[in-house]
Image (spheres, rainbow, N blue to C red):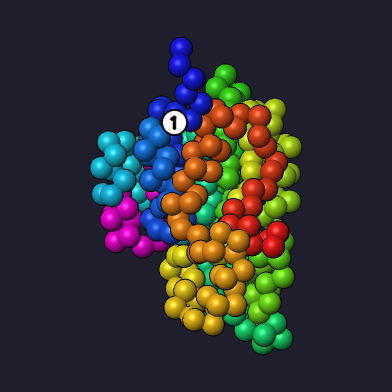
Amino acid sequence: MPFKPFDLTGKVCLVTGGNGGIGLGMVEAMAQAGADIVIWGSNPDKNAAAKERVGKTGVKVFAQRVDVSDEAAVDQGFADAISAMGRVDTVIANAGIGIKGKPFTEIPTEDYRKILSVNLDGVFFTFRAACRHMVERAKSGDPGGSLVAISSLSAIDGAARNEHYAATKGALLPLIKAIAVEHARYGVRANSVLPGWIATEMTQKSQDSDVFNEKVISRVPLRRWGEPADFGGIAVYLASDASRFHTGDQILIDGGYAVF
């Protein structure tokens, strides 16, 4: 039998925030590797566009409008995904928001609460629903699953004027490690991915800034912004049997920025 560790045929992969940016880059790669796809997003128009785009690969695509900060919506959304697709093998918690940076002493409490509700609460709710499903499957004789949290370079770097954002992304690292340890007995793996400076809607203002490009992006050893497509490979790897003994890790994808 040929060696095909990255073949995702027969697997179902759910990506929150999968209708754009890094999430869509991951979705497209996993679909091309044969996975059926569940897309969660809060914008129905972007969901529809992503579904049409990914559906051209020939895989089954199910798009849902889900606000991950809403506990009930997450639980219902996951139940609906299972009903539509039969199972979920990989869950990538990518949905997140950024709020315009301010000096730490001027960050409003409402901004802190808002970013916390999506970037941390949303991941907690999503992975809790996923683990319930995967543990239930394991107890029925069908173990396995992969959970991936999209953290950030800001989790390990000093993100001045973005303490609220950095706090949510940093909190994902111990969350993932704890899930990995507790659920390994069910064949469930959990890892985090830390993107560096990536060209998405969230970073558009920085992309348009000559000063930012000169002072920051010039320090990236690979000398460019990252792109959503740069995350396709890691998504396929973590969703596939190629990573079946890889868990509890944090994987930095930043073009070398953190080590320079």
**Range covered by the magenta-colored residues:** 37-51
Q: At x 28% / y 49%, what residue is drawn? A: 53
Instruction: Identify the residue position indicated by label 1 in the image.
Output: 8
The image shows residue 27, relative to residue 157, as above or below, that is above
Closer-to-camera residue (85/248): 248
Q: Position of residue 170 (x, y in %)?
A: 70, 60
Q: Position of residue 259 (x, y in %)?
A: 70, 59
Q: Amino acid at mark 1?
A: Leu
Whether residue 111 is visible, yes or no, is: no
**Mark 1, other Cα within 10 Å: few <14 / some 14–19 / many ≥20:** many
Asked whether 42 falls inside the magenta stretch, the response is yes
The image shows residue 200, relative to residue 144, as above or below, that is below
Whether residue 186 is visible, yes or no, is: yes
Q: Horizontal placement of 255 versus 175: left or right? A: left
Closer-to-camera residue (36/29): 29
Q: Horizontal placement of 96 versus 249: left or right? A: left
Which image quadrant for residue 80? Answer: top left
Identify the image quadrant of the C terminus: bottom right
Q: At x 66% / y 65%, what residue is drawn? A: 154
Q: How many marks?
A: 1
The image shows residue 29, relative to residue 219, as above or below, that is above
Q: Position of residue 205 (x, y in %)?
A: 47, 78
Q: Position of residue 219 (x, y in %)?
A: 62, 69
Q: Horizontal placement of 22 versus 251: left or right? A: left
Q: Secondary structure at mark 1?
A: loop
Q: At x 67% / y 85%, what residue is drawn? A: 103
